Image (cartoon, rainbow, N blue to C red):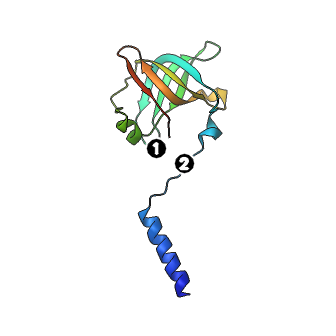
Amino acid sequence: MKRAFLALTLAGAFMAVVPAYAHHSFAATYFEDKTITIDGKLVQFMFRNPHSFVHVEAPDDKGEMVTWAVEWGGGGQLSRDGVSRDTLKPGDHVIITGNPGRNPEDHRIRMRSIQRPSDGFGWKGVVQ
C-alpha cells in the first residue's frame, strides 16, 4: 500500500512539473502530400496561440473569390522567427503556399510559406 501511494505521489509530482502538450493531427485536417498556392489580399491576421491564422481573399480553383483560412504557427514560434502581430496588415498582397484542407468547401490551408511582394517579406517553415 505504501508503495502504491509513493508511486502515485511521484507520478503526480512529475505531472505537475512537466508540461503536457496536446495536439491535433494535421494529417486529419490537411492533405500533407499536396500543395496549393493562393494569391490575394490579406483580410485578417490573428496572432495567437496555439496557432495563428491569416484570412486571405483569393480565387478558388473555379476562379471565384473566397476567404481562405490559413493555419500558421503559434505566437511563440512565430516570434522566434521574427514575426510579430504587426508584421501583416489588412490589405497586404500575399502569396501563400500550403497544404489544402481535406474538405474543399472549408477553404483551409496549412501554411508552408508566405510572401509579401511589396517589400520582400517572407516566411517559410513547418507549422507545429
How far across and down, in percent of the image, does residue 104 sit? Answer: 66, 27
Mark carried by residue 23: 2
Looking at the image, how many numbered discs can be counted on the residues?
Answer: 2
Task: Provide the secondary structure element on which disc 1 rests.
Answer: loop
Left or right side of 74 for 29: right
Residue drawn where x is 48% and y is 71% of the image:
12
Mark earlier in primary sequence (2, 1) = 2
Amino acid beneath label 1: Pro
Mark carried by residue 128: none
The quarter holding residue 116 reads top left
3D distance between C-alphas at marks 2 and 1: 9 Å
Residue drawn where x is 59% and y is 29% of the image:
99
- Can you identify the residue that label 1 sits on? 50
Q: Nearer the viewer, residue 57 or 4?
A: 4
Measured along the vertical axis of the image, is residue 86 above or below residue 118?
A: below
Residue drawn where x is 51% and y is 30% of the image:
111
Circle 2 packing at 10 Å, graded few (<14), some (14-19), many (20+), is few
Amino acid beneath label 2: His
How far across and down, in percent of the image, does residue 74 sit? Answer: 44, 40
